[in-house]
Structures are given as C-alpha cells and as structure tokens.
Image (cartoon, rainbow, N blue to C red):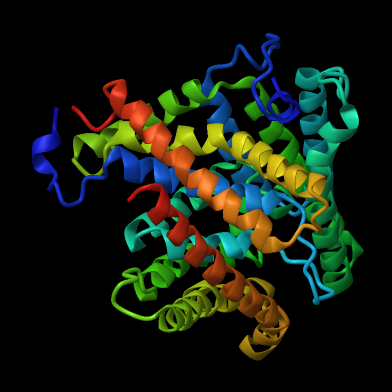
Amino acid sequence: MSLLNQTLEVSAKGTWLHRWPAGLKLLSLFSLGTALVLTDHIFILGASAVVAGLVCLSVHWPPFMRGSASSTRSSVFLWPLITLMAIVAYIGFVSGFEHALVVLCRLLALLLFAISVMATTSVTAMMAVVEKFLQPFDRWGWIRADKVALMFGISLRLMPVLLEQWHEIREAQAARGHRASPLALLVPMLVRTLQRAAEMADAIDARGGSSAR
Amino acid sequence: MNSTNKSPRLALTTQQMVRAALFTALVIVFAIIPPLPMPFVPVPLTLQTLGVMLAGLILSPRLAALAMLLYVVLALVGFPVLPGGRGGLAVFAGPTGGFILGFIPGAFVVSWLAARNQSETTTAAMIARNFGAAVFGGAIVVYAIGVPWLAMVTGMSMDRALMAVVVFLPGDLVKAVIATIVALRVAKLQIINNP
C-alpha cells in the first residue's frame, strides 16, 4: 500500500519477536518504562538503549530497505527525533550534560523498544490483550472491556491512516501552490476525520458491532 | 451478559466511541508531525495542545475527556505517542508529566464551557465564548496541573516554574484563536453534510 503504512504497520515477516505473545510484549514495554524511571545509572540506561537498538534492528533488518522511497520514509521519524534532541539539549542546558545523557538513553531505549513491539504485534492481538486485562473490571460492571479494547484498537490502527491523510492534504495544498496555512490544513483534516468516524461507526454497527451484547 | 447493571444514559454508542478514538489518533498525529509555519508570526505552531482544544470544541465534555484519557493511557503503556516519540511511565515521572495529565480535565473544561448550540447566540458571541473556553480549558487548566507538577519534580519554586512556562502563553492564545475558527468552520460543514 502506501509508504507510511509500510513504516508503521506490522511487518509480515516473522521474526523472533513476532512469536512472543502480545500480552508479554505489552507487559515488557510497560515494565521497561517503569524500570527505567527507577534508575539514574548511566551504564544501565546506556546498555538498555543499546539492547533496545539491537532488538529494533533485529526485527527491522535491513533498517532502511523496506518501502520504495527511503527518504520519505525516514522523514516520518525525523521530526520526533529533532524534538527529542531539542528536549535533551534543553535538559543539558538546565541541569548538565550527564543528566541529559541519562534522559537521552532512557527515552531512546523506550522509543526503540516501543517501535519494535508495534512492528511485530497486530492491533487485533493488542486488542485481545486489553480486553483480557480489563475482564475483571468488566465483571464488576465498571466498564465494557470489549468497548475499551475497540477504542484502543481504533486509535492505534487509525494513527498511521490519519498521518497519511495529513500528508495528502499538505500535498494537495502544495499542488495548488498554497503556502501551508494552518486553517487550510486543519479544516479538511478535521472534517475528513469526522466523516471517517461516521463511516467507521456505521460499518461497525452493520457488522453487528460492539454495542449489542 | 451483564448489560443490565449499566444505566443506558452512560452507555456509549458506536458513533461516540469511534469519534473519541479518532480524536485520540488525531492528537497522536498532532504530537508527532512538525509544527506548522504561520503567516505573520515567525514562530511555528506546535499542534498538540491545539488537538486538546479542538477535541473540547468539537466533542461533548465526556467524549473529549475520554479521548484524552485514552491518549494518556496509550502513553502510559509505553507507546511513543508524545512529542519526540516519547512514552512510558518515564515521561509522567518527568517534568512535563503534569501537562499531559492536564489534557484530560483540560479538554473536559473546554467542552463544558464551549457554546455548542449555534441557534441560541450570534456567531460573534459564540466565537468569543469558544475562544474563552479554549484558553481556560486548554491553557489555564492544563497549566494549573502542569506547573505544580513541574515545580515538584524539578524542585523549582512555584514562581520559577510559572516563569518557565509563561513563554508558552502567547502561543496558546494563538492556538485558541485557530481552534475556535477551525471548530466553527467544521461545525458549519457538518451541518451542510448531515442536515
């Protein structure tokens, strides 16, 4: 399909991480996020970042070959990376180089592992995990686990789609020779998103949906 | 199975669920795309808090808060949905955690204060009210949680923490203007599309 979908969607290739159960992967992701907050030790954090980098490479290898135009592909990650560097530079400016390095290693380790998990786990599998995890709360009548799981899945699945939609609108404006004005981009973005929501809801209901139980 | 013990008033329709979930996805997209260049202003526009304001102005209070809650939960689990591809508990333990948590009440307050019924007031009155709602919910409420959090995590005094974020206030005012206009145009187009 499109470039962005190839970047952000689950790769079909089965690597070792594909074979892990989705629940274990999500649990590891959350545990890693928690564990890395508890330590300020640069060696532990640095090692975690390196390991996460290796994990990411092992499921994404070769790193920049999938997809046809690697330049467009990498631009998806360019801005988040610039933001990350700006945050680290700011921390370095405020509280010193060593602390900045600690934060950089921590954030990189988490980001790389999160990318690996997202690249090897289908949204359906993640939804099943969420539903199972919330089952007790459902039994007590607090929430509807299936509905929460559906919302969770829709956000994750539609994120790359909306990103693509944003680039389409930008390109359409550029093709007409418009300098990107915020209103000219945001209004179609919102309208299309709301239309998509209405269509998706109809499609879900037509298939027997989640509201009937 | 157990639908009997839930009041129908609280149950979400599929339509509402999908809307909230798509706004979550929208805020994620706004968090990771580059800021927009602005006409007349030299500083580019970052979009994340604009997403919070727009969720408030377009969704009902409950759905706006729900969309932001889902965003916070996704970030908390560790998905890289925050600016800079950040995520995980690390961010919430860090200086900016309070601002992100503040999105939940922020979007709720925007929506709660916003004027939704166009027939009741003039367009000018509605714009003024929605601008006020966007500033109060999208900036003041978010800061009210974010600034004490920042002070607590970094050990700054409240005054210094407040000074550190006050530079963002002009940008938030600009965002509130943009969010108000966008929401108004979207509302008009929605009426045309679904009479």
| Nearer the observer, A118 or B28 | B28
Decide: is A163 above or below B116. above
Q: Residue at x 52, y 49 (%)?
A: A191
| Nearer the observer, B103 or A59 | B103
Residue B36, quarter of picture: bottom right
Q: Residue at x 79, y 21 (%)?
A: A60
Q: Residue furthest bottom?
A: B159
Q: Residue furthest left?
A: B4
Decide: is A126 above or below B95. above
Counting every numbered tag in the picture gives 0
Q: Residue A105: x and y, percent?
A: 81, 47
Report whether residue B101 is seen: no
For the N terminus of chain B, the quadrant is top left
Report whether residue A30 is seen: yes
| Nearer the observer, A162 or A199 | A199
Q: Residue A108: x and y, percent?
A: 78, 43
Quick check: B179 left or right of B188?
Answer: right
Q: Residue at x 33, y 46 (%)?
A: B16
Decide: is A181 above or below A139. below
Q: Residue B140: x and y, percent?
A: 52, 80
Q: Residue at x 39, y 73 (%)?
A: B114
Q: Residue A188: x and y, percent?
A: 59, 50
